[in-house]
């Protein structure tokens, strides 16, 4: 960190000590017993008319977020070709009202987190940075799970440093390591939560049975699985989140252009005077009140199109057609 960042860090430490933060987290209204349900407030509209969801019952975010995977280089590896444009995308997202930005230490690796800090630190009030750990990148073409206890604790500390944060509002286990019991992995995140380094814990790429096991170790606030209009294999996980009041963050929310061609998707897009990508995002927002789509892009122009999708109002007939597609 530079001298300015260090000065800001020191000011933050004087305002809120880690012990004070832990007391607020554990003793406040959002505290829950490990393994018990996290009670979420109902989805509401904020003053600007955007739909809002409370992660963990106390962390308000606009439901349409931003996924920061695509701001990195080719195949999610290294720095982007246009680093300035990547920073502009992040700044513009916040200007457009996005206050949930999702990333991971594996994106780059590390470069996505570094770019977020470069563009947005000191973070505007209300901006929530969610990140993930437990998936390594030995090369551009490989993603290898590592859910070992000590490794995950190192991941949290590394993300804190890169993001220039005192604590991480939402830290997610990126994937379940088949070689490590999920209880061991979540035990590491519980330790970091108890130390005040994590506010809420989330999961990614999991089935309902794994969510149940995880919640016996530490309260779980969100689940991030692949889900879109053409790929609904995580329907059971979504239903579980609806029942238990957990946020559901669908990755790959538009599922690629090929899956959106033809049929009901193009018909609805024409009726709405919108793109098929906008309709795909709008469908997610209409699909469930716990849905927190995080479409990503490396282009400011495309970002504006994605955010505008949050204003689309699909009719019951259009939703029925898309549900049946």
Image (cartoon, helix red, strand yellow):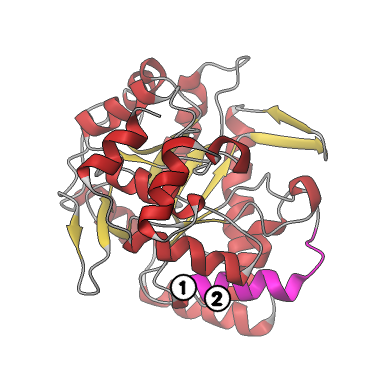
Specify whether residue 83 is painted magenta. yes
Decide which of 5, 295 is in the foreground and name it.
Answer: 295
Quarter of the figure that contains the C terminus: top left
Which residues fall within the magenta stretch? Answer: 79-93
- Please tell me which residue is depicted at 36% across the width and 60% down the height of the picture: 310
Residue 299 percent across, percent down from the top left: 65, 66
Where is mark 2, residue-wise?
91
Residue 304 percent across, percent down from the top left: 51, 69
Decide which of 265, 294 is in the foreground and name it.
Answer: 265
- Please tell me which residue is depicted at 33% across the width and 20% down the height of the picture: 212
Structural crowding at the residue carrying mark 2, measured as other residues with C-alpha within 10 Å and reported as few (<14), some (14–19) or many (≥20): some
Residue 14 percent across, percent down from the top left: 41, 76
Q: CA distance from mark 1 to mark 2?
A: 5 Å
Decide which of 37, 242 is in the foreground and name it.
Answer: 242
The local secondary structure at tag 2 comes to helix
Structural crowding at the residue carrying mark 1, measured as other residues with C-alpha within 10 Å and reported as few (<14), some (14–19) or many (≥20): some
Tally of numbered discs:
2
Specify whether residue 207 is painted magenta. no
Q: Is residue 234 visible?
A: yes
Classify 139 as above or below 274.
above
Q: Is residue 219 visible?
A: no
Classify 174 as above or below 40.
above
* In the image: residue 158, left or right of residue 274: right
Is label 1 in contact with label 2 (beta carbons under 8 Å)? yes
Where is mark 1, residue-wise?
94
Q: Name the dominant secondary structure of the magenta segment.
A: helix
- Please tell me which residue is depicted at 61% across the width and 43% down the height of the picture: 257
Quarter of the figure that contains the N terminus: bottom right
Splitting the image into 4 quarters, where does residue 20 fall?
A: bottom left
Q: Which mark is residue 15?
A: none
Residue 198 percent across, percent down from the top left: 43, 49
């Amino acid at each position: 960190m530079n001298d300015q960042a260090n000065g800001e860090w020191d000011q933050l430490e004087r305002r809120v000590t880690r012990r004070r933060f832990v007391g607020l987290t554990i003793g406040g209204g959002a505290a829950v017993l490990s393994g018990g349900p996290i009670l979420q407030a109902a989805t509401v509209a904020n003053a600007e008319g955007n739909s809002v969801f409370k992660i963990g019952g106390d962390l308000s975010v606009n439901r349409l977020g931003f996924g920061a995977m695509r701001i990195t280089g080719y195949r999610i590896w290294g720095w982007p070709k246009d680093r300035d444009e990547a920073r502009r995308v992040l700044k513009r997202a916040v200007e457009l009202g996005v206050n949930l930005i999702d990333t991971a230490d594996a994106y780059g690796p590390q470069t996505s987190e570094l770019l977020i800090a470069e563009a947005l630190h000191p973070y505007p009030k209300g901006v929530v940075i969610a990140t993930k750990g437990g998936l390594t990148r030995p090369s551009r073409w490989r993603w290898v799970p590592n859910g070992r206890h000590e490794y995950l604790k190192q991941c949290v500390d590394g993300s804190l440093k890169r993001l220039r944060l005192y604590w991480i509002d939402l830290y997610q286990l990126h994937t379940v390591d088949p070689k490590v019991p999920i209880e061991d992995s979540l035990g590491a995140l519980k330790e970091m939560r108890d130390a005040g380094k994590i506010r809420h814990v989330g999961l990614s790429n999991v089935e309902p049975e794994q969510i149940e096991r995880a919640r016996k170790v530490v309260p779980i606030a969100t689940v991030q699985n692949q889900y879109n209009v053409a790929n609904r294999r995580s329907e059971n996980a979504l239903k579980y989140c609806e029942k238990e009041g957990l946020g559901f963050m669908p990755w790959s929310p538009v599922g690629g252009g090929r899956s959106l061609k033809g049929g009901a998707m193009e018909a609805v897009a024409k009726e709405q005077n919108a793109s098929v990508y906008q309709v795909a995002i709008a469908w997610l927002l209409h699909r469930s009140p716990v849905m927190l789509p995080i479409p990503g892009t490396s282009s400011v122009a495309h970002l504006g199109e994605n955010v505008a999708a949050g204003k689309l109002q699909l009719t019951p007939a259009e939703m029925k057609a898309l549900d049946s597609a």
